[in-house]
Amino acid sequence: MRKHLITLPALVVMAMSTLDVDAAWINDPAPAFELVSLEGKDAGFPTTPPKVTFINFWASWCPPCKDEFPRINRLAAEFAGKDVRVVAITVDKALANVNRFLEASGESPVSVEILRDPSGKAAKAYAARAMPMSFIVGRNGVIRFAHMGFQTGDEARWREEINALLAESK
């Protein structure tokens, strides 16, 4: 029994030591980033004027991302023209893999803003250790919600959280 009591704390310390202490989390300022769109245009965060921002990290090799992508695309279409920005950031290194993923998704038109992070720098700043991983940032630039992975029904929670942030005063 005593051996297990010593081992468990050691495991917790080891697990925590793998986390990047500089990575942002809920109630932290959202890290700024400069990335490139699929069209090769510079795009980043934050934006002016500030908007409620849904940031999703994904990869073409991620099975849950395939289920999640159409829902994020619909979310972007639903909030188009409102004070909301929906950004899907791929960590894929090869643009060809991203293009194959998008073709296979069958989503047309693509309403979500897609950015590339092949170096993983933005993903690391957000501690996006799992794919997919999403963050919802308030107009004040603070991360308010984080979602690891994807399950059917998450999109309802995203809408609730975005609407709650929209209802807050600017």
Image (spheres, rainbow, N blue to C red):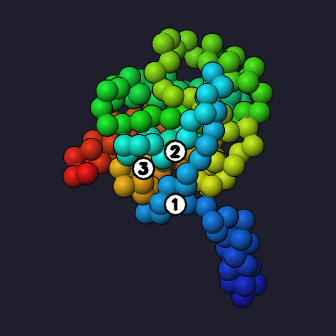
Look at the numbered disc 3 and give the secondary structure of its residue: strand
Residue type beneath disc 1? Trp
Point out residue 120 in the picture as x, y percentages from the top left corner: 71, 45
- Sequence-first tag of 1 and 2: 1
Using the image, determine if residue 62 lies above or below residue 129.
Answer: above
Q: Quadrant of residue 74?
A: top left
Residue visible at 48% across and 13% down?
Answer: 109
- Residue 95 locus on image (x, y percent): 73, 24
Q: Residues within 10 Å of mark 1 (few under 14, many from 20)?
A: some
| Location of residue 3 (image quadrant) | bottom right
In the rendered image, which residue does mark 2 sit on? Answer: 45
The residues bearing labels 1 and 2 have C-alpha atoms spaced at a distance of 16 Å
Q: Residue at x 36, y 55 (%)?
A: 140
Q: Are marks 3 and 2 in contact (CB under 8 Å)?
A: yes
Circle nearer the N terminus (3, 2):
2
- Residue 128: percent from left, percent from top: 62, 50
Q: Nearer the viewer, residue 151 or 72?
A: 72
- Which of 159/91 is in front? 91
Q: Looking at the image, can residue 36 be seen?
A: yes
Instruction: Find disc 1 in the rendering and name its residue.
Output: 25
Q: Residue at x 39, y 29 (%)?
A: 75
Kind of residue at badge 2: Phe
